[in-house]
Amino acid sequence: MPNVRVRDGESIDSAMRRFKRAVEKAGIPKELRRREFYQKGSAIRKRKAAAARKRHLKKLTRENGSAPGFREVRR
């Protein structure tokens, strides 16, 4: 659990910004969204496989300049 101590002379707004940044860095909002509803194991595996495919295509696009299976459109 992130915690922030308010420094001497520090405004509440800047302390809140530091706290929000610490919460985001800890991954708490992402975890809350993930646990918002129950997902079956097959749905989790399917989502992870789709994310892996997307990462792989993105990596290939960076290396080659275009994704495999896509032709450049000439205009």
Image (cartoon, rainbow, N blue to C red):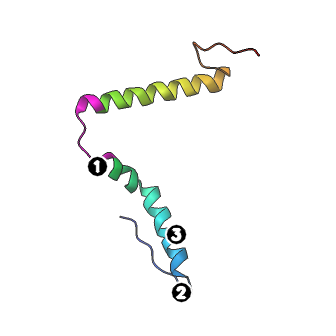
User: Closest to the observer: 16 or 75?
Assistant: 75
Q: Position of residue 46 (x, y in %)?
A: 33, 27
Q: Answer left or right for 30 relative to 54.
A: left
Please tell me which of labels 3 and 2 falls first in the chain: 2
In space, the residues marked 3 and 1 are separated at their CA atoms by 25 Å
| Circles 3 and 2: CB atoms closer than 8 Å | no
Element at badge 2? loop
**Disc 2 or 1, which lies upstream in sequence?**
2
> Badge 3 is on which residue?
17
Instruction: Name the residue tied to disc 1.
Output: 36
Magenta segment: 34-43
| Residue found 58% across the figure and 15% down from its top | 68
Q: Mark number for residue 8?
A: 2
Looking at the picture, tell me which residue is in the foreground, 64 or 46.
46
Query: Does dot 1 land on a helix, a strand or a loop?
Result: loop
Number of callouts in the render? 3
- Residue farthest to the front, as pictured: 75
Q: Residues within 10 Å of mark 1 (few under 14, many from 20)?
A: few
Query: Disc 3 and disc 2: Cα gap in Å?
Result: 16 Å
